[in-house]
Image: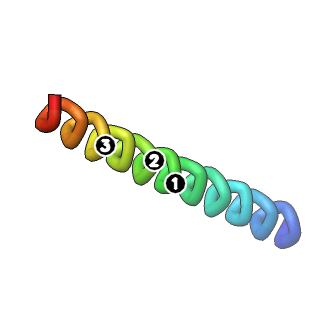
């Protein structure tokens, strides 16, 4: 039972890490798009 709790916490952490990295990617893409639109 304790092991299951630890593994679920690990998966939750992994999920949040993926979510955060995706948000950073989206904001980076938005930044690049805004720069391109300023130039254009």
Tag 2 residue: 25
Q: Which residue is drawn at the image coordinates 68% and 64% (left, top)?
A: 9
Vertical comparison of 24 with 3: above or below: above
Taking the image as shown, residue 21 lies to the left or right of residue 28, namely: right
- Give the Cα separation between the discs numbered 1 and 3: 16 Å
- Give the Cα separation between the discs numbered 3 and 2: 11 Å
Q: Which residue is drawn at the image coordinates 15% and 36% (left, top)?
A: 39
Helix, strand or loop for disc 1 = helix
Tag 1 residue: 21
Placement of the C terminus among the 4 image quadrants: top left
Q: Which residue is drawn at the image coordinates 62% and 51% (left, top)?
A: 15
Q: Which residue is drawn at the image coordinates 21% and 42% (left, top)?
A: 35
Placement of the N terminus among the 4 image quadrants: bottom right
Q: Nearer the viewer, residue 4 or 13?
A: 13
Vertical comparison of 29 with 12: above or below: above
Q: Nearer the viewer, residue 30 or 18?
A: 30
Does the CB distance between marks 1 and 2 fall below 8 Å? yes
Q: Nearer the viewer, mark 1 or mark 2?
A: 2
Give neighbour class at mark 3: few <14, some 14-19, many 20+ (Cα, 10 Å).
Answer: few
Give neighbour class at mark 2: few <14, some 14-19, many 20+ (Cα, 10 Å).
Answer: few
Tag 3 residue: 32
Taking the image as shown, residue 26 lies to the left or right of residue 5, namely: left
Does the CB distance between marks 3 and 2 fall below 8 Å? no
Coloration mode: rainbow
Q: Nearer the viewer, residue 18 or 9?
A: 18
Residue 21 percent across, percent down from the top left = 51, 54
Residue 10 percent across, percent down from the top left = 72, 64
Residue 13 percent across, percent down from the top left = 62, 62
Task: Answer with mark 3 or mark 2, whichever residue precedes in sequence.
Answer: 2
């Amino acid at each position: 039972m304790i092991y299951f709790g630890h593994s679920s916490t690990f998966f939750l952490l992994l999920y949040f890490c993926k979510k955060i990295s995706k948000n950073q990617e989206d904001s980076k893409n938005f930044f690049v798009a805004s720069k391109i639109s300023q130039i254009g």
